[in-house]
Image (cartoon, rainbow, N blue to C red):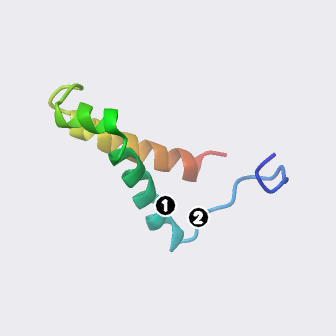
Amino acid sequence: MDCHGSHGPPAKFSPEALPLFSEGIHLILSRWTALRLAVENEWGGRSSRQKFDNLVVDLISWFTASK
């Protein structure tokens, strides 16, 4: 059951909403102090920035492609 009380598939993002949603995900993650420090200090290795970018893309995909 979703927040509107229905059991159907999740609503699709409109073409206008998807860029805003993507920006929101990026902003939320970039303001997460521990994650930001990990990326800045390369706690995940030299590819820490790439791992951050992959996390953003994976989260957006999960919300937009998952059923």
The residue to which callout 1 is attached is 21
Percent x, y for residue 4? 80, 57
Q: How many marks?
A: 2
Percent x, y for residue 27? 37, 54
Percent x, y for residue 8? 80, 53
The answer to which of marks 2 and 1 sits earlier in the sequence is: 2
The label number, if any, that marks residue 48 in the structure image: none
Q: Crowding near pointer 1: few (<14 within 10 Å), some, many (20+)?
A: some
Q: Residue furthest bottom?
A: 16
State which quadrant residue 34 falls in: top left
Location of the N terminus by quadrant is: top right
Left or right side of 13 for 42: left
- In this rendering, is residue 54 above or below 42? below
Q: Amino acid at mark 2?
A: Phe
Cα distance, mark 2 to mark 1? 9 Å
Q: Residue at x 31, y 44 (%)?
A: 53
Left or right side of 9 for 55: left
Percent x, y for residue 49? 22, 40
- In this rendering, is residue 12 above or below 45? below
The residue to which callout 2 is attached is 13
